[in-house]
Image (cartoon, grey):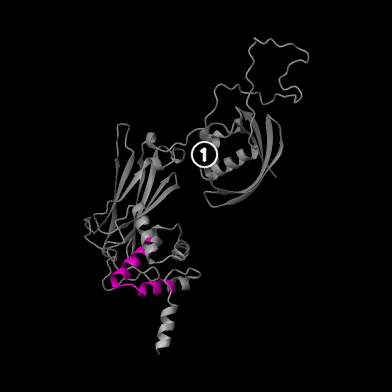
Amino acid sequence: MLFSLLLFTSCKKDHVDATTTQTLQSSINDMASSLTTIKQIKFNEALYILKTFGVEAEGDVNELKALGQLIDGKKVPEILSLADQVAQKNGIEWASTAPPSLGEMNIFGDESAKESDPNDVRASSLNLAAQLSGDTGNGPTSMQIIPRLVDNAGNPVSFTGAALETTLEVFSNGVKLSTAKNLMQDNNFRGFNLKFSSLLASKIVDNKIDITVSVKTTAKTFKMSKIGLDVNPNALKVPVAPKTDSTVIVQDPNAVIDPSNPTGTTPGTVTDPNATTPTQPKQPTADPKNTVSKFLNNVSSQNLKAAFDASSNPSWGSYESFSNPTSGFGAVKNVSVKNITTNATNPNVSSVSATYDVTDKNGKTTSLRATFGLKSVNGEWKISSYKINP
């Protein structure tokens, strides 16, 4: 009997085994069983913090898989330390050294209400307040968004010790710009501080955003939206435009340079030593396919200003036309590049072929083969033409 007890004890794991969901749960249970009751509660809270805020995934199954990858091989102190970092990064009032504060947490359990469930908050609806803040003289720099659970009469509901998962989603013209999460532990929740500097100016239509906040209780998820909120355009994020050398003469892209006589002088001509030598245009040193690759990556990430700056294509028109969310590159959600090849190049012009898949905002994916024409401008390759091949 003593031998069996020793064998059982020696098989218990002291670190996370995320090989499968079953080994993940088994190893976590082993680790928790060696802790005191209070430590077990804080350990479960830490796992909940990491599963909810430490990974990017949709749905419980995917969140568990992502959590397993995050903590695989880690021991209890490492998990507690990681949860402290995640809580601090997300502005959550939680610490591994503080008393238990999130009620009964179980990342593998169901969400049905228990006899004493602090997350089983009885409310009728959700109210949402949004006010501009951070004005330093050039207009507001952020927006404070505060949700409140209310009863039938519109009065705030009183509760404490909860851990209600609260999510903020920010949109403009129907396109999601950002998502943030936090925990509502009582109805004095400070809400979210949305900094305008975190929003790309190129993605904001008419200087307005829409916001949606959801609060998840045990019995119900409450949701409310506000549409057409004004933002300060001067505080939005604008990518830094690439620097160009203003002293360089722009070269005629149609000019042909004789490699045996790059200066264009007639053989035998005596050059006046006191004459001023004209500045030669810079020649690109980078591979032109790098410009196409960066262009497609910027379109994929919707950094459309940087993509537009990498072009000099009259057929694309103005930036507004180029970035149009309906008829322009603003309609693109994702670009998956398969192959990029440089076809031909000389110091002035180049041709690059690219094969890639484009997914639009409606989720439709189209496979494309395109040819990009490029020209040399101030020592840089710029996209000057674009043709989709059959």
Report which residue position mark 1 lands on: 304
Q: Is residue 178 above or below residue 343?
A: below
What is the magenta range? 26-49
Q: Is residue 282 above or below residue 149?
A: above
Task: Judge whether residue 15 can be spotted in this image.
Answer: yes
Whole-percent x and y of residue 11? 45, 78
Give x and y (percent) for residue 242.
52, 32
Q: Residues within 10 Å of mark 1 (few under 14, many from 20)?
A: many
Above/below status of 157 relative to 357: below
Kindly indicate the quadrant of the structure image that contains residue 307: top right
Q: Identify which residue, 320 or 372, lies in the foreground.
A: 372
Instruction: Tell which of 322 and 13 is nearer to you.
Output: 13
| Residue at the image position 55 percent from the left and 35 percent from the top | 308
**In the displayed structure image, the side of residue 219 where residue 278 appears, left or right:** right
316 up-or-down from 261: above or below: below
User: Which amino acid type corresponds to the residue marked 1 in the rendered image?
Assistant: Leu
Res. 326 in view:
no
Give left or right: position of 326 versus 152.
right
For the stretch drawn in magenta, the main secondary structure is helix
